[in-house]
Amino acid sequence: MSAATTDTLQILLAAGPGPGVGPLHDLRDAGRAALAKTGLPGRKTEIWKYTRLKALDGVAWTGPDARPEIDGDWIDAQAGFRDAWRIVLVNGRFDAGLSRLTDLPSAARIAPLPEAAGAHGAVAAALGQLANAERFPMVALNAACLEDGVAIGVEERALLEKPIHVVSITAPGAQPVAAHPRLLIRIGAGAQATLLESHLHLGDGAPAFTNAVLEIIVGEGARLGHYRIHDGPENALFVATTAVSVAGGAQYDAFALNIGAGLARNESMYKLDGERAEIAVNGAYLGVGGAHIDNTTFIDHARPNCQSQETFNGVLSDHARGVFQGKILVRPDAQNTDGHQMHKALLLSGKAEVDAKPELEIYADDVRCGHGATIGALDADQLFYLRARGVDEQAARALLIEAFLLDTVERIQDLAVREAFAEALTGRLRALQSSLAHGEAA
Amino acid sequence: MVASTETVKQVQELGADRYKYGFSTDIEMDMAPKGVNEDIVRMISAKKEEPEWLLDWRLKAFRAWQEMAEPEWAKVAFPEIDYQDAYYYAAPKSGDKPKSLDEVDPKLLETYEKLGIPLREQEVLAGVEGAPKIAVDAVFDSVSVATTFKRELEKHGVIFCSISEAVKTHPELVRKYLGSVVPFTDNKHACLNSAVFTDGSFVYIPKGVRCPMELSTYFRINAENTGQFERTLIIADDDSYVSYLEGCTAPQRDENQLHAAVVELIALDNAEIKYSTVQNWFPGDENGKGGIYNFVTKRGACRGVKSKIAWTQVETGSAVTWKYPSCILQGDGSVGEFYSVAITNNFQQADTGTKMIHLGKNTTSKIISKGISAGRADQTYRGLVRIGPKADGARNFTQCDSLLIGDKCGAHTVPYIESRNPSATLEHEATTSKISEDQLFYCLSRGMSAEDAVGLIVNGFCKEVMQTLPMEFAVEAQKLIGISLEGSVG
């Protein structure tokens, strides 16, 4: 580890709550111990090959205390989904005042993490199990700085009629802020729920660093839809580590939409941990300006007869950079596995870059696994087709880009979410139309 | 399930005796003392009567090697190599260098005859009329023992000789190109090779010449505890063409032997080099004992406009393979191709693939990789396709297919795809599957034995690659696939 990153780590740790007491202190101590061994991810860490956290260096990061005023209307306007139970986290801390949890049925339990961990042995035991601090330095950093967060539990066979919407706001006041939101979500056997995540940014220009960790346990035969949208300005760094275990017969449908202008890394691990588990993990990203968007996924077929499907489409303009790393592991006993993965990227500018690393690691023979990756410009034939029908160049390009990204959004199983995500995406595309039309920033 | 249980049993029963090249030749050898140090490097250089600049280069490489770390990113596992426990120079003892084949030790000739490599030109000529001629450079442990058809090649201006000879006869060419594609700092194995390489082949095809016959090198490790470090350098000048074949075998021994070769190809304007390998080093026995560590650095530079380099490899041997034949596509419109069939059985491990570095405009590359894993073997395709910012209009197509036979083996695909040019088009596709029951049933119901059926299906699976091999090699490779998979399906 270089001197700069060692300093950065010390600054980040100092901004956290420090070793201390409370139900989370074990986790914090373990996080610190793991970091002392590994340090922050650096150049030598293979899985961080294409994404550097250099922007963390040389910033006087502070803890979550200093935050601007946030009003509910702003959240309504930014996050949408008014008809959902809303959990608001500001700089990683649960904000009961801004949250909207009235009429929450008793089958769903939502509580601040320290409280839940203190009251329920099961919560304390589950924390840090899926997202392992020793293997993932960013998880260790989250744990080391952990003071709050939210635990969500859905009882067996419960059917939640509205989505649960987690709105995580990173809000630097005058000072640069480092936030470490943490969520533990347990969906009981046979239950059905939808989890929405909006990662927003509120501030006047000070740098913001969000290092979120989510652990999700999907019980036997349960169904969970999990949809994330991330947006942020150029000086925002966003890292989210998501670890999901899916039990037998359960279905998990996920989508990640990234339209931020800063650095975003979504690292997700999915374990198919029971027979006939099915997951669909999809996403779309739009990188403009100096955006750096990294989607790293690891799908672990640990049991037989499971299915996984993954599709990511990305568009990169200006000098944006896109990274896709997708690994499928099929363990020795996971016979009769279906695993399919696709990543497509459009490069619109000569200074944009995309790096893809789709990976298969297979130890069972009765499998149907495959991956595909394509990188290219807009299809000249398709453009010609539209132009021949009287569509002008700029509109034709916009139409093709939109269709390319919406192709994956279509895969979202929840209709309302699909429409909302499509709207967010098309809204952003329209705002950027003139710059995307020429492939270079105006 | 029944089929796979039987598979495992069959694989276990399978003796290593199917490796028919496992014999060794009892011949008097000239050996350097065990181990490697600056004196050994100096001794090798002195034995070869090398000029000062080459010794300096070797010593620089050796010093760099001592500082370098082993590459650890490949998905292979083997005990740490004790570099001091091997011989770095072993040559069959003979007084002066033989002037003709008649002076070569008959035991050596016998060895090559047993291997099916004709060193006597008349034998080739006496064969079937119209049979294609192949010029062979035979390398036995550390030295080249014979090069055939030299005179006929000379008529066309083609230089084909051992690299030690080329250092003496064409120092300007060797000095200009040696290490220009694979610098000694490239990786630890290539670095060791640069310090202690003993022999290998040198080819120069002059401007406008289409090499009149296939050129071939046959590598044989014979002596115990030796490492083989050969170095091949092929230069195709403007508008020339050459097809080059490489074959390799080693005796069956209990200890692991190291083979760390370096191959450098240079294609100038409009030149084409086709490099084919059938690698059949001893793979170790059915318990994973013994076998060759095949750590090879192969790289071609398409320096000229519209130049082309095509690598074809059939990898069936070696205990551990670490090999990535690559193309640097510098010249505008240059073409790189990589066709590979890799078969691993028993405890073999292979981490192989290619790198296609697109630098010039309108460069194209194609990668077809077929991996077959059986027994307890582990196999990885690892590849890189990189499109530089200036490579306008570059294209790449990659297809990697893996076939698994049995449930104790592994097949992995690790491609890196990097593009920095919007006008480039890249397509990558990979699949992993097993031999379908339907295909097997279809063959069996027509009276084929299970083994023949698997051979047929696997050969069909590899067809695209096999078609790119020169005819006489394709026949050998096809048989080899059958032998390598013998008993892998019940």
Image (cartoon, helix red, strand yellow):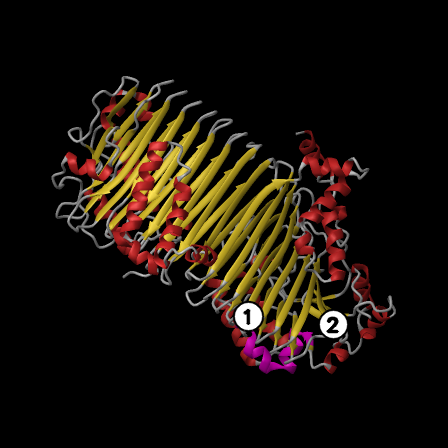
On the rendered image, what quadrant is the C terminus of chain A found in?
Answer: bottom left
* Residue A101 location, quadrant: top left
Q: Any magenta on residue B178?
A: yes
Horizontally, is B490 left or right of A131 in the view? Answer: right
Q: Are marks 1 and 2 in contact (CB under 8 Å)?
A: no
Q: Which segment is the magenta one?
A: B160-181
* Residue A436 location, quadrant: bottom left
Residue located farthest toward the front when viewing the structure as drawn: A390
The residue where tag 1 is placed is B302
Q: Any magenta on residue A316?
A: no
Residue B432 % position (x, y): 58, 43
Q: Which mark is residue A76?
A: none
The residue where tag 2 is placed is B213
Residue B170 % position (x, y): 63, 82
Residue at 45%, 66% (x, y): give it.
Answer: B392
The amino acid beneath tag 2 is Met
Horizontally, is A197 left or right of A302 in the view? Answer: left
Q: Label 2: how many residues lie within 10 Å, few (<14), some (14-19) or many (20+)?
A: some
| Prevailing secondary structure of the magenta residues | helix
Residue B131 % position (x, y): 82, 67
Q: Label 1: how many residues lie within 10 Å, few (<14), some (14-19) or many (20+)?
A: many
Residue at 34%, 61% (x, y): give it.
Answer: A438
Residue at 66%, 37% (x, y): give it.
Answer: B436
Q: Nearer the viewer, residue B192 or A318?
A: A318
Asked if one can make out residue B402 in the rendered structure from this viewpoint, the answer is yes
Horizontally, is B34 left or right of B29 in the view? Answer: left
Q: Nearer the viewer, residue B296 or B229?
A: B296
Secondary element under disc 2, as helix, strand or loop, is loop
Q: Nearer the viewer, residue A391 or A113?
A: A391
